[in-house]
Amino acid sequence: MNKDSTTTTRRTKRAPFSQSREAARMRACHGQRLAGIVASATGKRVALEDFQPGREHPIPLDWPTEIAHSPGLVLPYIARDVAHALLEDMQASLGRIDGVIGFHGNRFLGLADLQDISPTSLLEAAEASEDSVLFYLDDPRGVLLVDCYSCPPAHPFSVAVRGEALIQRLQHCFE
């Protein structure tokens, strides 16, 4: 075996340990703040311990790099007032929602169960974290994504819906 393949083999064996240490470090650095943002936005008692890092996402997701190209219902790059009005319309259709919350791409935090929250609270959480908040609804089954990036400042929000049953219930909100 040559030196390059031995080095590659060692790196491959150590990668899971390295990833696990990095996830623990990220959770320790950012987890409390993100859990606090969710608690503040939803008005629910949510602590870091409520987020389960190893929990599988209820619906497998593969979001494209460009949210405008995402399947499902998408309203990309909108102002806060437009996003808020859209989420209020969703709340009028769904009422308060139950499910699982997390942040896209932040597997170190994991997912937490939440009941009886307002869809507009997802906007608050996305804005405070400047991140993509995912909420997996139990009924109708589907996922809401509320995304916030401070650049461009005029239109920092995007809202997306996936899941056939949820799309059918919310189609009129996007028309």
Image: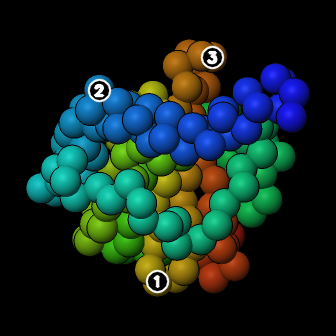
Q: Residue tagged by mark 1?
A: 139
Secondary structure under the numbered disc 2 in the rendered image: helix
Mark sitting on residue 152: 3
Mark 2 neighbour class, 10 Å CA radius: few under 14, some 14 to 19, many 20 or more? few
Quick one: label 2 or label 3, which is nearer the N terminus?
Answer: 2
For residue 106, side relative to residue 110 (left or right):
right
| Placement of the N terminus among the 4 image quadrants | top right
Q: Nearer the N terminus, badge 1 or badge 2?
A: 2
In depth, the one of 163 and 104 nearer the eye is 104
Q: In the image, which disc is placed on residue 157?
A: none
| 3D distance between C-alphas at marks 1 and 2 | 34 Å
Q: Badges 1 and 3: C-beta atoms under 8 Å apart?
A: no
Residue type for callout 2: Cys
Location of the C terminus by quadrant is bottom right
Question: Label 3: few (<14), some or many (≥20) within 10 Å?
Answer: few
- Rendering coords of residue 133 (x, y %): 47, 47
Amino acid type shown at disc 1: Asp
Amino acid carrying mark 3 in the image? Pro
Q: CA distance from mark 1 to mark 3?
A: 34 Å
Q: Residue at x 83, y 46 (%)?
A: 69
